[in-house]
Each structure stands twice: as structure tokens, then as C-alpha cells.
Image (cartoon, rainbow, N blue to C red):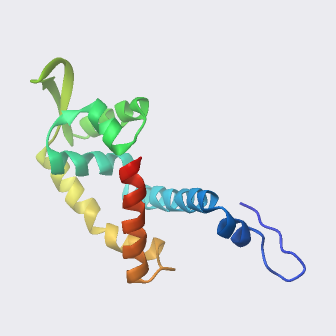
Amino acid sequence: MATHENGTGQTYFPRLAAERLDIALCRASAAVARAGEIHATAQGFGVGQHLVLKMLTAVGACSQQRLSEELRIDRSVMVGVCDDLEKSGYVRRERNPNDRRSYAVTVTEAGRERLRAAETAVPSYLDETFAALTAAEREQLTALLAKLLIRG
């Protein structure tokens, strides 16, 4: 986003962000998402793929619909994410024993290994992305965002 300096050398956006929390949060979210995509590209592993493997490892097999809803990834995008993970041997799709009309997505051992490898790079990525915040501020931001997301 381009900013223009006024006569005092200050930019307008910080003032706008202070007045409009929604705009500040949207811009911060977009910046973090861009950083996440750059990190994921460098790792050769998409953010969506990482999140799917992380959820499957944590909660076990589930439908693409549940993955889509819980991870807030559009259904059409989720199909491609699962297709790519399946082609790489990181997940399997099997008939859902609870609903024969749908498929359960299950993480494979190769998927667990890929997730472990990807997770090793996360702490340094987070430190770099949130370098402007102290550890206490990061904890506070995490708690505040969790409150907002629980309501949504």
C-alpha cells in the first residue's frame, strides 16, 4: 500500500490505523499472510497443506468439509489442497465410515514426517514476522485474537 508523506514527514496510515482497528487488523493480516506464503514457498509446502496436516494429526481423520470449515479454507480450494497432499502421499481419502456419501481424509506416516519437518521452521518464521513485538506483546496479541476468533 502506498503512503504519502505530509509536510511533517509522517505518513497518514498510522493515524488511520489508530482510528480504525478493523482496517489496521485487515492490513496486518494481509502482511502476515504474505509473509506466510513467502515462507511456505521457500519450504516448498503450502500454508493450506501445512494446516491440513496439522489438523489431521491433532484430531484424526475427518471430512474435507470439516477441514474446510474448521480451517476457514474455501471448499473449492480445499479440494486442491487435499488433491496435492494425496498425490504427494501425505494423506489418504477413504470412505467415511460415519457417512458413506463422503470421504474421510487421513494423514499418512509420510504426512506426519513432512509436518514435523515443516514445523521446525515455524519458530524462526514467527520470530522474524513478529520481530516488532516483544514476547509479552505476542502473547497478548495471541490471546486477543483468540477471543475474536472464538466469537466468529
Foreground residue, 99 or 83? 99
Drawn side of residue 132 relative to residue 97, left or right: right
**Residue 71 image point, x, y percent:** 34, 44
Question: Is 133 above or below relative to 75?
Answer: below
**Horizontal relation, residue 14 to residue 62: left or right:** right
Instruction: Tell me: 18 left or right of 97.
Output: right
Q: How many numbered marks, from 0 up?
A: 0
Q: Residue furthest right?
A: 7
* In the depicted structure, whether residue 63 falls above or below residue 4: above
Task: Please give the name of the residue rendered at 22% of the width and 54% of the height, measured from the top-left corner.
Answer: 114
Question: Residue at left 35%, top 30%?
Answer: 79
In the foreground, 93 or 17: 17
Residue 112: percent from left, percent from top: 16, 52
In which image quadrant can residue 137 be found? bottom left
The residue sitting at 15% across, 20% down in the picture is 99
Residue 46 visible? The answer is no
